[in-house]
Image (cartoon, rainbow, N blue to C red):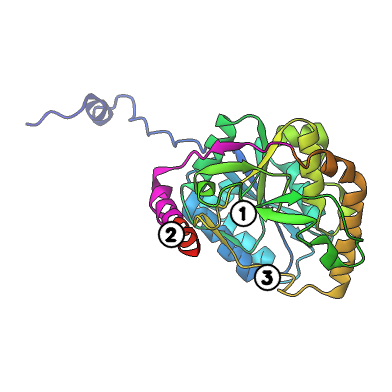
Amino acid sequence: MRSCPRRVRLAAAGGPPAVAPRPVPAPAPVLSVVVPTHNNAAVLGRCLDSWQHFASDQPVEILVIADGCTDGTHGLLDGVRRSPWGARAVRLFEEQDVHELRCDNRGFREASGSLLLAWQDDMFLRARWLVPELLEAFARYPEIGMLSLIRGLRLLPQVHPLDQWADLQRPEHLQSTLGPSALLSWFRLAEVDAVVRPWVVRRACLDAVGLLDEGFVPTEWDEADLAYRIRRSEWAVATHGYERAGAFTHLGSSTLGFGLSEAYKARALANGRLFRSRWEPTIREDLSRPRRTWRRPVRAAAVPRMLLRGAAAAAGKLWRS
């Protein structure tokens, strides 16, 4: 007769019962993803599905800030939070039409992680490697306080009056950048002056310099102001093109629509003027400062696309020359 394990024999003989294996506890959140939303349930559902699919095993929490939602958002979230992943990782907070900036601040105050990601409900995670790479980047480079996942901004001294919204976007005033070299930008993180969403910031930075300034409500130039405050406190602000690397996709603003109304442009112009009034001397002082780069902590799964797209960019540059 085949002998059975001692634990089974004891149980069969009336001995101590077999000990069931303990469930592995979920990792404590390191990255807190803040997602404001307003009446965008269908798109929000795709956003949450993407985080469950590509990051359910990561130390991540999702904080959904429902800003006066009257559509099916709450029903969607009730369903998500009944799942094991949703019960563990998704948290819901309510606001009443306070706009994205204040929703981000609410999420930052409620978050548990040491890294905070300002995300939007129409952004969809597309790669399992993104979260581990972000965690490694912030661990490897403690001098980086804020990192944009799409592009950075270089601010130039004002040379034209700011009479209309388009004056803020003039290339003489504002330049989008991924770093000093188009080819090397696939392999490096690059220091910039300011960022656009989505971006990750250290909680320690917000503890030191404060949250997004609500004087910039509803939005625009709030994150540039935060970046300058972080830089003034001697952290670096950086960027990398993770969207083009295939880590996530962004629909554009599904909630607000693709066009910008004249009222929106008027508010953004006021915010741009406010930003310039605060930081114009710093912009002038920083014009010639050296801007650092850091080696990107590339995950193996990201290498094929990075090499393919990098080679295509290099070939295009050679062809144009």
Residue matched to label 1: 150
Measure how far apart labels 3 and 1 are at the Cα level.
18 Å
Which residue is nearer to you in this view: 121 or 281? 281
Q: Which percent across, then down, holds residue 249?
A: 56, 62
Measure how far apart labels 3 and 2 are at the Cα level.
35 Å
Cβ–Cβ below 8 Å for labels 3 and 1? Answer: no
The boundaries of the magenta stretch are 289-312
In screen coordinates, is 138 left or right of 171?
A: left
The answer to whether residue 12 is above or below residue 80 is above
Q: Count neighbours of disc 3 (C-alpha within 10 A) and say few if under 14, some if 14 to 19, many if 20 or more.
A: some
Q: Count neighbours of disc 2 (C-alpha within 10 A) and say few if under 14, some if 14 to 19, many if 20 or more.
A: few
- At label 2, which amino acid type do we have? Ala
- At label 1, which amino acid type do we have? Ile
Q: Tell me which label, 3 or 1, sits earlier in the chain.
A: 1
Residue matched to label 3: 254
Q: Which percent across, then down, holds residue 185?
A: 54, 48
- At label 3, which amino acid type do we have? Ser
Residue drawn at point x = 62 percent, y = 54 percent: 150
Q: Quadrant of residue 163?
A: bottom right
Q: Tell me which label, 3 or 2, sits earlier in the chain.
A: 3
Cβ–Cβ below 8 Å for labels 3 and 2? Answer: no
> Secondary structure beneath disc 1?
loop
Residue matched to label 2: 315
On residue 191, the disc is none
The answer to whether residue 148 is above or below residue 268 is above
Which residue is nearer to you in this view: 38 or 187? 187
